[in-house]
């Protein structure tokens, strides 16, 4: 099967599909973190190249509820609409099977509710990161290994955060797909 992993530079999901014998390519405007088939550039350069499956991780910066205090400015200057348009181009691509991933955000009301909400701890990683999946032609992911939710940190303002998140200030690290979820996608959707 030909698999496109859109907006991925980590190689985690791409490499999971390659290990299962699929022809998988990641694509991002950033270079890949690990060697492997990767198109560095605009996803729309290759989105119509005959893929059987696309798993897309569009940027959530202007869509996630975690940034709601900035929504008015982002609506005003057009950034939020750009994020919505990009998301919708992913879900409406001419590919038979599609999964679009994003955190809890405005797409639940702008587009529709996600088909599934998953957590890394349902797939063997001791961490909490609420992740929404919008699916086309794919089944829901089945949990593979339910473990503890991991440690939490209480910020000086009293906010409870997953420790993995508070320990990693880099957006690049925070956006990476947990390996258990990547493996489940390859196993169940491949």
Image (cartoon, rainbow, N blue to C red):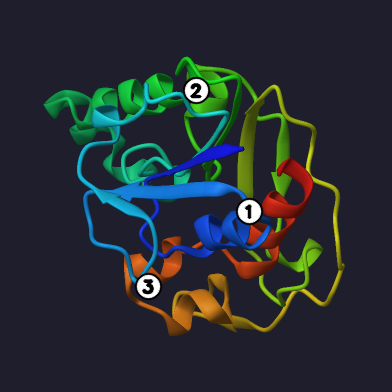
Q: Earlier in the sequence, mark 3 or mark 1?
A: 3
First in sequence: mark 2 vs mark 3: 3
Considering the numbered disc 2 on the image, is that residue within a helix, a strand or a loop? helix
Label of residue 34 in the image:
3
| For the residues bearing labels 2 and 3, Cβ distance under 8 angstroms | no
**Would residue 162 be found to the left or right of residue 190 on screen?**
left
Q: Position of residue 180 (x, y in %)?
A: 70, 66
Answer left or right for 94 relative to 30: right
Q: Give percent across and percent down for residue 80.
A: 27, 30
Quarter of the picture holding the C terminus: top right
Query: Residue at the spot x=54%, y=79% of the render?
Result: 164
Q: Residue at x 50, y 74 (%)?
A: 165
- State the SS at label 3: loop
From the viewer's perspective, is residue 64 above or below residue 74?
A: below
In the picture, the disc for residue 108 is: none
- Judging by the rendered image, the residue that carries numbered circle 1 is 130
Report which quarter residue 168 is drawn in: bottom left
Residue under the image location 31 percent in, 39 percent down: 62
Above or below, 129 relative to 159: above
Q: Residue at x 85, y 55 (%)?
A: 143
Q: Which part of the image, by quadrant, shows the N terminus?
A: top right
* Residues at marks 2 and 1 touching, judged by CB atoms closer than 8 Å: no
Residue at numbered disc 2: 91
- Of tags 3 and 1, the one toward the viewer is 3
Precedes in sequence: disc 2 or disc 1: 2
Q: Position of residue 30 (x, y in %)?
A: 23, 57
- Of tags 2 and 3, the one toward the viewer is 3
User: How many neighbours does mark 2 have within 10 angstroms: few (below 14), some (14-19), or many (20 or more)?
Assistant: many
Calculate the distance from the C-alpha at mark 3 to the C-alpha at mark 1.
25 Å
Find residue 139 and report its horizontal and vertical position in percent. 79, 32
Nearer the observer, 58 or 162 = 58
C-alpha gap between disc 2 and disc 3: 27 Å
């Amino acid at each position: 099967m030909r698999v496109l992993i859109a907006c991925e530079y980590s190689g985690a999901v791409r490499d999971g599909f390659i290990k299962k014998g699929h022809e998988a390519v990641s694509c991002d405007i950033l270079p890949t973190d690990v060697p492997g088939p990767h198109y560095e550039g605009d996803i729309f350069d290759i989105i119509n190249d005959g893929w059987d499956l696309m798993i897309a991780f569009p940027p959530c910066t202007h869509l996630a509820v975690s940034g709601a205090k900035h929504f008015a400015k982002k609506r005003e200057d057009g950034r939020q609409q750009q994020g919505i348009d990009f998301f919708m181009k992913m879900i409406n691509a001419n590919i038979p099977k599609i999964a679009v991933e994003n955190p809890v955000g405005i797409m639940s009301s702008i587009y529709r509710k996600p088909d599934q909400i998953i957590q890394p701890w349902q797939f063997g990683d001791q961490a909490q990161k609420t992740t929404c999946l919008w699916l086309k032609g794919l089944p829901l992911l089945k949990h593979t290994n339910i473990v503890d939710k991991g440690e939490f940190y209480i910020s000086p303002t009293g906010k409870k955060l997953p420790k993995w998140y508070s320990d990693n200030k880099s957006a690049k690290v925070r956006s990476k797909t947990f390996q258990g979820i990547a493996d489940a996608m390859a196993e169940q959707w491949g």
